[in-house]
């Protein structure tokens, strides 16, 4: 997952006519192509729509509604710009905070992104600025990148900007500021050091990058902050060497996600047969409709459900791909019949193995299936990075 800020794409003093300029983006596009050649899946979060919009129309000022309009004017140019630098088809994905907090939309976004990667496309994500204001707004693309890194289960979040990572003070204003190559934990002191404000075009400055890194860290993803203007830095990155700041992950990715699933209140229950229980336990398989005996409760797609086996034991819990009525119609049937039975299909599983946590039967207390798990049972992990 790579995030590229406006400061790398536009606003150069020597640039005639404004608009997007490939001088740094070309190197980053080469880096993406090399990573893809190494069989890595790459998702790009790119700012620059507002800057691109400004070059298309005469408009002074910096008000919120004006920036929303400018983003709309510039977004198509931004996608065309990356397409011009990419050997593979690029795909536009516009997201908001609200999309990622809503579990159904979260699952839909994740499924679309996975499909784009499977097809070999390069997803280029930006905030949907037309609708993203106030409480809907993630605030900046750094935080959006952290949320999407968690959504796609990224190995690493790379944030390219116009400075060589985090400094102990504002690098342009504080002559004693020194680079910080490694951050184990994002502390309030570090956030303070990074609060000196953004560059001319950027919105968040280093603070939002550190906040994003802290969110990614909680989700088990490390973040690399580096200068995308330095061709040697970008080339070294392609060889696995970072000249910049590495913010360490604070937990194992899967553990962070599964920890949340383990304690989230369930909206319903799936009764599964012995064969399915064995497949889940022994092979780490997804739960297919054929193994579902019954669905209890009125859950919706994306809700957490309990999985109960023969004898009522709670075997696990997971995010369900279909709503209760749909599960009842496909229960006991083969995955290939899903479309014939309900008219569409989100995928072959009822609960995908990535969205499933199996419980230790001896130690796991059974929780009620109506969402009332009792006080203290719900562990709140950051909303920004988990569904
Ligand atoms: N402690 C710090 N370390 C590094 N950069 C800082 C720090 N404090 C403030 N900054 C500013 O943050 C800027 C990068 O943020 P921003 O302009 O939002 O970039 P982008 O457009 O890439 O998101 C730097 O150019 C620098 O001026
Ligand atoms: N959605 C806005 C991006 C805002 C933003 O976060 O910018 P930046 O600080 O340069 O990453 C745009 O495309 O201009």
Image: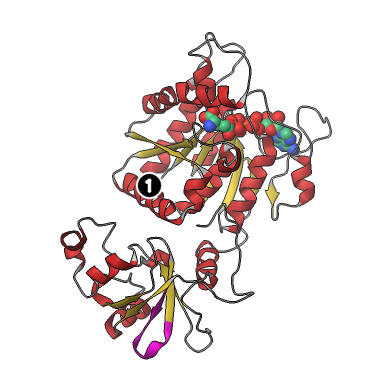
Q: Does 179 appear above or below 370?
A: above
Q: Residue under label 1, please give it.
A: 113
Q: Nearer the viewer, residue 75 or 33?
A: 75
The range drawn in magenta is 306-314
368 drawn magenta: no
Query: Which residue is depicted at the point 39% across and 67% down?
Result: 299
Image-quarter location of ligand 1: top right
Determine the secondary structure under disc 1.
helix
Q: Does 205 appear above or below 135?
A: above
- Other residues around mark 1 within 10 Å, as few (<14) / some (14–19) / many (≥20): many
Query: Which residue is depicted at the point 39% across and 88% down?
Result: 312
- Taking the image as shown, residue 179 lies to the left or right of residue 159, namely right
Q: Position of residue 164 (x, y in %)?
A: 66, 35
Q: Does 223 appear above or below 133?
A: below
Q: Position of residue 129 (x, y in %)?
A: 51, 32
Which color scheme is applied?
Answer: secondary structure
Q: Position of residue 263 (x, y in %)?
A: 54, 72
């Amino acid at each position: 997952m790579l995030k590229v800020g406006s400061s790398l794409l536009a606003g150069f003093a020597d640039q005639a006519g404004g608009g997007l300029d490939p001088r740094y983006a070309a190197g980053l596009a080469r880096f993406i192509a090399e990573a893809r050649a190494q069989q890595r899946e790459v998702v790009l979060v790119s700012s620059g729509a507002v800057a691109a919009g400004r070059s298309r129309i005469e408009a002074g000022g910096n008000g919120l509604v004006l920036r929303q309009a400018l983003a709309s004017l510039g977004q198509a140019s931004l996608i065309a710009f990356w397409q011009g630098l990419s050997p593979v088809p690029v795909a536009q994905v516009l997201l908001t905070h609200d999309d990622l907090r809503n579990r159904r939309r979260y699952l839909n976004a994740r499924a679309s992104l996975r499909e784009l990667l499977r097809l070999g496309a390069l997803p280029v994500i930006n905030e949907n600025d037309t609708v993203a204001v106030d409480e809907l707004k993630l605030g900046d693309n750094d935080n959006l990148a952290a949320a999407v890194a968690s959504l796609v289960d990224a190995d690493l979040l790379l944030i390219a900007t116009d400075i060589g990572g985090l400094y102990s003070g504002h690098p342009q204003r504080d002559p004693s500021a020194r680079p910080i190559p490694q951050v184990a934990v994002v502390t309030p002191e570090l956030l303070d050091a990074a609060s000196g404000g953004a560059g001319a075009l950027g919105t968040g400055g280093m603070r939002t990058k550190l906040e994003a890194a802290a969110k990614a860290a909680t989700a088990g993803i490390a973040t690399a902050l580096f200068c995308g203007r330095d061709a040697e830095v970008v080339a070294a990155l392609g060889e696995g060497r970072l000249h910049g700041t590495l913010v360490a992950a604070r937990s194992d990715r899967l553990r962070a996600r599964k920890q949340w699933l383990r304690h989230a209140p369930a909206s319903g229950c799936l009764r599964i047969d012995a064969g399915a229980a064995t497949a889940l336990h022994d092979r780490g398989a997804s739960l297919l409709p054929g193994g579902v005996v019954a669905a209890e409760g009125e859950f919706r797609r994306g809700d957490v459900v309990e999985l109960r086996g023969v004898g009522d034991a709670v075997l696990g819990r997971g995010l369900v791909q279909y709503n209760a009525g749909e599960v009842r119609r496909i229960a006991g049937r083969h995955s290939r019949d899903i479309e014939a039975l309900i008219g569409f299909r989100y995928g072959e599983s009822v609960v995908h193995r990535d969205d499933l946590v199996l419980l230790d039967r001896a130690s796991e207390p059974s929780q009620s299936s109506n969402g009332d798990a009792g006080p203290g049972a719900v562990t709140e992990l950051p909303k920004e990075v988990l569904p």
